[in-house]
Image (cartoon, rainbow, N blue to C red):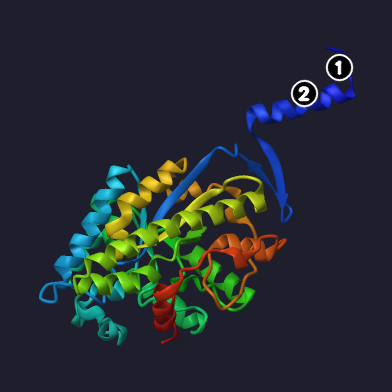
Amino acid sequence: MKINKRNMHLILRLLLVTINISLFAINGTALAVVSAASKEIAVTFDDLPNRSLFETDKNNPTKQLTARHHKILRALKKYKITAVGFVNEKGLYNNCDGNKAEQNKPSQYNPDPARVAILQVWLDAGHELGNHTYSHLTLNRVDLDEYVADIIKGQRVFAPLMHKYGKTPRYFRHPFLHTGRSIFIHAALEKFLAQHGYIIAPPTIDTDDWMFNMVYSKAKQVGDHKKTQQLKNEYIKFTANKFDFYEAASQQMFGRSIKHIWLLHAIDIDADCLDELLQLVKDRGYKFITVAEALQDPVYKLKDTYTGPTGVAWLFHWDYSDKKIVDWKKEPIPSGEVREIAMMDKDQ
């Protein structure tokens, strides 16, 4: 075959397809793009230990809480997943009453040993723990000094536990995904986190599990099995729809599937659906990876100038900070009773 300019162009294109590597530039950063067929995801859980407001066993709520965590951990083990659980240490106190410790007298009020043991079970299983602040504050409503003090307070228990396993806390996640209302707050918080050995683990997929759980846990409490099954089915279908949207957004923004980080919670509906959820994601072609591996994707170094009032996944942050090419009005949202009750709770 005669090698003219046209043929040379075709050969070069074939080479790019063969090695599945190209360059994609956004925000002035050259991104190494792997094959579009490569789909990877890290799994994270917020709000450990997360006592439910609707325990069915009122006489021994911590026993029920422990059983929920063991159920989550069994599913993670089945799919060989190493996850990160983000801790709110206020939840380690009886009745979630960390107010006594907030009065700077923590030595007089010890956390519930059974709840501390839940964190230890996560570490025994090979998972990591991260900082989610002590009392789940929103950076959109408190000043930075109060917020960072809550971060420091939120590592009194879980950090020493991790040290016993030869690990050091390294991941932080904003409660409510609220990152502050100015880029100056962004920068100041990131500087503080870096000084204390933390990096942000931003979720790129948020499947709104907490909304479904508001209705699900209440139905479970009263023994409404028909409703709980209906909600489980709706939640799994909704999760698939959310993945459809985020995968399309990733392709639209970066021309590929990024290494995703999935936000879940240590709540009833996730414990009861996790096996099916993980199988759903596996069937979509995903390989489960760690948060550390996900953060190797260059997208996590992109600038973030989002300062809006709503907590949203980081694909929105990056799109907002750059080209604004995704139609976020098409992002699926829960409907009917799930959305109505969740919004009522959020407004309180």
> Which residue position holds label 1?
3
Residue 336 x, y percent position in the rendering: 43, 74
Query: Which residue appears at 41% of the width and 43% of the height?
Result: 282
Q: Nearer the viewer, residue 189 or 322?
A: 322
Dot 2 or dot 1: first in sequence order is 1
Residue 164 x, y percent position in the rendering: 25, 55
Q: Residues within 10 Å of mark 1 (few under 14, many from 20)?
A: few
Q: In the displayed structure, does residue 222 sit left or right of residue 252?
A: left
Amino acid on which the number 1 mark rests in the picture: Ile
Does the image show residue 117?
no
Identify whether 121 is placed above or below 226: above
The outermost residue toward the front is 226
Q: In the displayed structure, does residue 284 sit left or right of residue 187?
A: left
Q: Nearer the viewer, residue 182 or 58?
A: 58
Badge 2 vs badge 1, beta-carbon distance below 8 Å:
yes
Query: Which residue appears at 60% of the width and 64% of the height?
Result: 330
Identify whether 301 is placed above or below 4: below
The quadrant of the rendering that contains the C terminus is bottom left
> Which residue position holds label 2?
11
Does the image show residue 161?
yes
